[in-house]
Image (cartoon, helix red, strand yellow):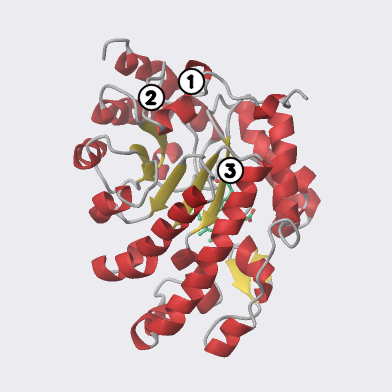
Amino acid sequence: PTRPPELTIKPPDMQHRFLRALRRQPVDATPIWVMRQAGRYLPEYRATRQRAGSFLTLCKTPELACEVTLQPLRRFDLDAAILFSDILTIPDAMGLGLSVVENEGPRFQRCIRSAADLDRLGDPDPETELRYVMDAVRLIRRELDDRVPLIGFAGSPWTLATYMVEGASSKEFAQIKAMLYCDPGLLHALLGRLSRSVVRYLAAQAAAGVQVLMIFDTWGGTLTPSTYREFSLAYMSEIIAALRQARVDVPVIVFTKGGGLWLEDIAGSGCDAVGIDWTMDLAAARARICDRVALQGNLDPAVLTATPEVVRREAASMLARYGHGPGHVFNLGHGIQPHADPENLRVLVDSVHELSRAYHRVGD
Ligand code: CP3
C-alpha cells in the first residue's frame, strides 16, 4: 500500500527550513514562528473564543483548536504551526479540575500538598482522557497539508508541578518551594509521575503527527543553579532520553525562561535546540554552545508593541548578532503579548525572511 502523503519522507534538501534549522543544516532564510502565535492579539482568535464560550472549550474541541491554530498562518508567512492547547491539559486529565478564569489565568479545584493528594492523581492515557489533543493534531496535520511543520508540546514536570502545588499562577512559589526544601521526597515523587505522563503524552503527539516537540519550562528560572539541575533539568533530560529510547526521533526544543546562566547544561540535556529569553545576548549564547545545538529566540516581546521601523531595526540587529550560517530559529523570548499589533508581526516575519538571506549564502 502507498504511504499517505504526510508520512512520506522527503529528501533532506526538500525539507522545511524550520526542520533544517533545528538540525543546523543550511537554509535559504532564517525560519520564524512566535510563541502564543494563536492568541488574544488576533481579533479572529477573540471571536472564535467568544463563540466557544471559554478557553477550555476551545482546547477541547478539535475543530476549534484546529481553526485557531491555522489563524496566524492565514495572515503571516510563518515557518511553523504550534498545536493550540495548553500545558495544563495533563494535570487536568489527572483529575485536578482545571478552569481558566478570564484576566486571572489558570486555577485548579484541587491541589497537591501531601502524599495522599499524590496517590489520588490519575494516570491519563493520551488516546483516552487526552484524545481531544490527539484528534486536534490529526485534524491540523490534514488541514496543513504539509505547508509548514506542526509543533507539539508539554510543560516541564517542574513547571506543571508549580501549578499543581500552588493551585494557580504564582509570583512567589511559596508552597512549592516549601515542599522542595522541607519534603523533597514528595516533590521528587510528583515530578517522577509527571515525567512519565509527559513522555507518554509527547510520544502520542508524535505518533498522531507532530513533527517537532517543545518542552516549556516557564518557571525553571525561579530555581537556584543546583535546584534547577535537580528538580527541573534532570527530569527534562530523562524525558528526552525516554523519547529516544522509544524511537520518537522528532527534534526536541527545551525552553527554560530565565535559564540563560545554565545554557551549557540545558544544551547537554539531549535536546536539539535551546529556546532562550530576551535577557541573553544571542552572539554570546551561540559562542557558549559552540553550535552543538540550535538556538531559538530571542526578541523582547515588547518590541511588537513599538512601531514597524523599530520592529525591522530590532530584527536586523538580532540576525546580525547570530551571524552567518544555520542553527537559528527566530522567535520571541516569550509569548506575544495580547496588546501587540498584528501588523507588527507581519513586519517582523517579512523582515526576518528578507534580511536573513545575506547570512545564508552558499559557501558561508
Ligand atoms: O504558542 C501557541 O500559540 C500555542 C498555545 C499555547 C497556549 N498555552 C495557549 C493559551 C501554549 C504553547 C501554552 C503553554 C502554556 N500554558 C505555558 C507555557 C508557555 C508560556 O507562555 O510560558 C504556560 C505557563 C501555560 C499556563 C497558562 N495557560 C497560563 C499562565 C495562562 C494564562 C495566560 C494569560 O495570558 O492569560 C493560560 C491560558 C492560555 N493558554 C491562553 C492561551 C492563548 C489565554 C487564554 C485566553 O484566551 O484567555
Residue farthest to the top, as pictured: 362
**CA gap, disc 2 to disc 3?**
33 Å
Name the quadrant containing residue 128. Answer: bottom right
Residue 230, horizontal then vertical, whole percent: 33, 69
Look at 69% across and 46% down and name the residue there.
46
Q: Quadrant of residue 168?
A: bottom right
- Residue 20 drawn above or below residue 273: above
Please tell me whether mark 1 sits on a helix, a strand or a loop: helix
SS type, badge 3 = loop
Crowd around label 2: few <14 · some 14–19 · many ≥20 (10 Å): some
Is there any visible trace of residue 99 in the rendered image?
no
Between discs 2 and 3, the one toward the N terminus: 2
Q: Identify the residue position indicated by label 2 in the image.
A: 25
Ligand 1 falls in quadrant = bottom right
Q: Which residue is mark 1?
A: 12
Q: CA distance from mark 1 to mark 2?
A: 9 Å
Q: Residues within 10 Å of mark 3 (few under 14, many from 20)?
A: some
